[in-house]
Image (cartoon, grey):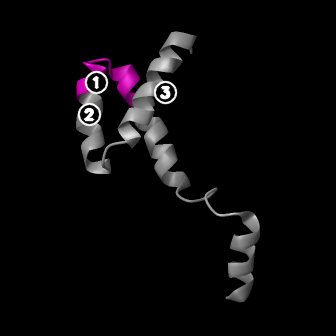
């Protein structure tokens, strides 16, 4: 992916994250203005971000202690 396109994807991704999840699809539809490839790329990043959840938000030691305590 060329540098300018990646900047566009990255900017839209972060702008979408600032909106409530229910408003993101409409935001992207408008922001991408018919560029379906751009919209798909950002949607893919958003889906991956959502799937990752809180995977890296807690320190590993904290997660391990909770797991052992169960």
Residue drawn at (74%, 79%) of the image:
65
For the N terminus, the quadrant is top right
Q: Which residue is mark 1?
A: 31
Q: Is residue 28 left or right of residue 15?
A: left
Q: Main secondary structure of the magenta part?
A: helix
Q: Which residue is mark 2?
A: 27
User: Which secondary structure, mark 3?
Assistant: helix
When the figure is inspected, residue 35 is found, relative to residue 25, above or below; the finding is above
Q: Earlier in the sequence, mark 1 or mark 3?
A: 3
Q: Which residues are magenta?
A: 30-40
Magenta span has 36?
yes
Residue drawn at (30%, 31%) of the image:
28
Q: Which mark is residue 10?
A: 3
CA gap, disc 2 to disc 1? 6 Å
Q: Relative to the observer, which residue lies in front, 1 or 15?
A: 15
Residue 67 visible in the picture: yes
């Amino acid at each position: 992916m060329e540098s300018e396109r990646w900047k566009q994807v990255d900017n839209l991704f972060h702008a979408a994250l600032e909106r409530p999840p229910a408003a993101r699809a409409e935001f992207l539809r408008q922001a991408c203005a018919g560029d379906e490839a751009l919209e798909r790329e950002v949607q893919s990043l958003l889906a991956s971000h959502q799937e990752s959840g809180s995977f890296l938000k807690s320190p590993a030691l904290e997660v391990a202690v909770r797991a052992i305590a169960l």
